[in-house]
């Protein structure tokens, strides 16, 4: 059985790693890894491959940046040549990035079976490009591997046949559990570098990259002012996404108390999450990781495709309401809010369940 994996951006790498590893234990399975190049610089791509123990890609499509349509078109044209040449028995795509939907469309056109890892998630907000990618990919997939029961519910409501849907758990948590000991080993050096003093330093960890938060100057300026106010009370560590750094450079210069740093590799960022007093983010994956780690999380979005992080986990949504953001931070710094629980099947074995289903299907 020949399984071809498609990855394009950092979240994909974390999701693909446990599936590649689990399938490697089956002698009957041959694997090909295709990197579309959607994330292409060293900080956003190369370091993640090294830290996650991913093999070098067999193919790098090198599509780079561009508009959503241009990026997807480039992936489709280049990926079609690969699948026609390599003739896999199954293509696996991950998450909800442009590379995921583009590869799914190619597979549908050339009649190659498709599996979607992290299927069924819905924000019900089609202004989000990721939501469109999720809908397209799930509509075309032959096998849908869901991380939580809400994914199954969404797919059944959309008319997907039950035999296509498999609740396997969260592959991102597989990677987190495997690499957590290595991340914790890095904490001492990282804390010293960032001057986070004390045996148990208190700090807020921030990530921002979504267009709704960073592309509108007035909204970004308001968020930065609120974070700067928070930094008067507690250190705020902010690894700045390249997209966000570009937008910040366009704002009027201000005195900032924030600790603005370059994007981090997976291990260093995981170490920062583990020791954070709370996390402020607009990332889907960070909502899941903080839920597993039981770290309070405040999400700067009006909705989430990961509701289990709210109903079961440690997450709360505040949208772009800076006053509510400030109130939620104050409450959590005072010890309020809840740590939540770890959702079912977020146990480090999702990749193995996916591998077992694929091998049994051949």
Image (cartoon, grey):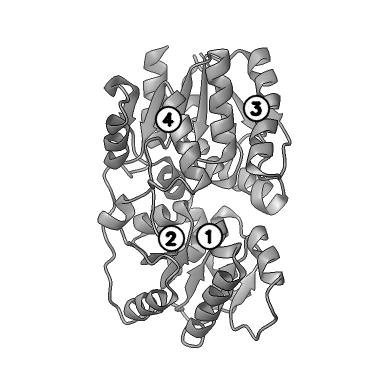
Percent across and percent down for residue 17 are 52, 37
**Alpha-carbon distance for marks 2 and 1?**
8 Å
* Of 184 and 118, the residue lying toward us: 118
Residue 300 x, y percent position in the rendering: 45, 64
**Residue, disc 2:** 301
Q: Residues within 10 Å of mark 3 (few under 14, many from 20)?
A: many
Task: Give me the C-alpha separation between circle 4 and circle 1.
Answer: 25 Å
Q: Is residue 87 left or right of residue 271?
A: right
Residue 177 in the figure: left or right of residue 242: left
* In front of the other: 232 or 249: 249
Kindly indicate whether the residue at mark 1 contacts the one at mark 2 (C-beta within 8 angstroms): yes
Q: CA distance from mark 3 to mark 4?
A: 17 Å
Q: Secondary structure at mark 2?
A: loop
Q: Quadrant of residue 287?
A: bottom left
**361 w.r.t. 184: above or below:** above
Q: In the drawing, what numbered circle is on residue 212? A: 1
Label 3 vs label 1, nearer the camera: 1
Looking at the image, tell me whether mark 4 or mark 1 is earlier in sequence order.
4
Camera-near label (4 vs 1) is: 1
* Residue receiving disc 3: 76
Sequence-first tag of 2 and 1: 1
């Amino acid at each position: 059985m020949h399984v071809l994996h498609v990855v394009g951006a950092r979240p994909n790498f974390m999701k693909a790693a446990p599936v590649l590893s689990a399938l490697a234990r089956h002698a009957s399975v041959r694997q090909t890894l295709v990197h579309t190049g959607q994330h292409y610089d060293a900080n956003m791509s190369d370091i993640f491959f090294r830290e996650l123990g991913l093999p070098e890609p067999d193919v790098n499509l090198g599509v780079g940046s561009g508009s959503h349509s241009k990026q997807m078109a480039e992936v489709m044209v280049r990926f079609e040549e690969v699948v026609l040449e390599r003739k896999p028995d199954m293509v696996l795509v991950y998450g909800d990035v442009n590379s995921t939907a583009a590869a799914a469309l190619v597979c549908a056109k050339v009649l190659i079976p498709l599996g979607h890892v992290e299927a069924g998630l819905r924000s019900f907000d089609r202004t989000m490009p990721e939501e469109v990618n999720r809908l397209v990919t799930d509509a075309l997939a032959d096998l849908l591997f869901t991380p939580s029961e809400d994914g199954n519910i969404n797919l059944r409501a959309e008319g997907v046949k039950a035999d296509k849907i498999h609740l396997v758990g969260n592959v991102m948590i597989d990677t987190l559990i495997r690499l957590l000991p290595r991340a914790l080993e890095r904490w001492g050096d990282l804390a010293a570098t960032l001057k986070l003093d004390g045996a148990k330093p208190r700090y807020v960890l921030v990530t921002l990259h979504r267009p709704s938060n960073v592309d509108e100057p007035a909204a970004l300026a308001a968020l930065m002012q609120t974070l700067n106010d928070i930094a008067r009370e507690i250190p705020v560590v902010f690894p700045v996404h390249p997209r966000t750094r570009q937008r910040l450079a366009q704002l009027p210069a201000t005195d900032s108390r924030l600790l603005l740093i370059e994007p981090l590799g997976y291990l260093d960022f995981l170490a920062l999450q583990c020791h954070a007093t709370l996390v402020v983010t607009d990332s889907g994956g960070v909502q899941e990781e903080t839920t597993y780690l039981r770290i309070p999380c405040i999400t700067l979005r009006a909705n989430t495709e990961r509701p289990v992080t709210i109903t079961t986990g440690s997450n709360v949504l505040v949208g772009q309401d800076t006053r509510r953001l400030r109130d939620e931070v104050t409450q959590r710094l005072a010890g309020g809010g809840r740590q939540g629980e770890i959702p079912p099947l977020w146990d480090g074995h999702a990749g193995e369940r996916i591998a077992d289903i694929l091998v049994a299907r051949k």
